[in-house]
Image (cartoon, rainbow, N blue to C red):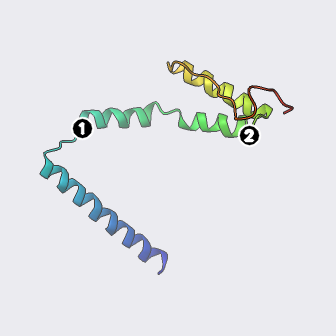
Amino acid sequence: MNLLHFRLAAACTMSLLFASSAQAQQQDGDRVDLAALTQIKNEAFQHSQVMENLFYISEVYGPRINNSRNHRAAAEWAMQQLKAWGLQNVHLETSPGRHGTDSAG
């Protein structure tokens, strides 16, 4: 099966799945909250920090072996980010057998 036929088959399958789920929603009386959907889309397209976070965790801190210097630095960065976003009780957990010991990194 060539790529064009595969894409066509995938598109048809997805269309059928979406059509059947839309019909099931109408039958159950479920309504889509368009205002909430618009707000979610706006946040995703206007205020997303996904690429910035991906850059930091993959390029700035790079490869991370457990309990290495990069691993600890990335974990500290992630904790600071979560706290800055307002999350509470953000903390590091130790690996079994490590119990917070600091090995060379």
Provide the secondary structure element on which disc 1 rests.
Answer: helix
Q: Tell me where residue 79 appears, x and y as whole percent.
A: 61, 24
Residue 89 picture quarter = top right
Q: Does the CB distance between marks 2 and 1 fall below 8 Å?
A: no
> Which mark is first along the chain, 1 or 2?
1
Other-residue count near label 2 (Cα within 10 Å), few / some / many at <14 / 14–19 / ≥20? few
Number of callouts = 2
* Real-space CA distance between mark 2 and mark 1, rounded to the nearest whole angstrom: 40 Å
- Above-or-below relation of 105 to 20: above
Q: Amino acid at mark 2?
A: Gly
For image coordinates 43% across by 36% down, the residue present is 44
At label 1, the amino acid type is Leu
Res. 62 mark: 2
Q: Which mark is residue 34?
A: 1
Q: Secondary structure at mark 2?
A: loop
Q: Which residue sits at x=50%, y=18%?
A: 86
20 w.r.t. 81: above or below: below
Residue at point 74%, 38% (across, down): 66
Q: Is residue 7 left or right of residue 89?
A: left
Q: Nearer the viewer, residue 35 or 16?
A: 16
Q: Is residue 103 left or right of residue 33?
A: right
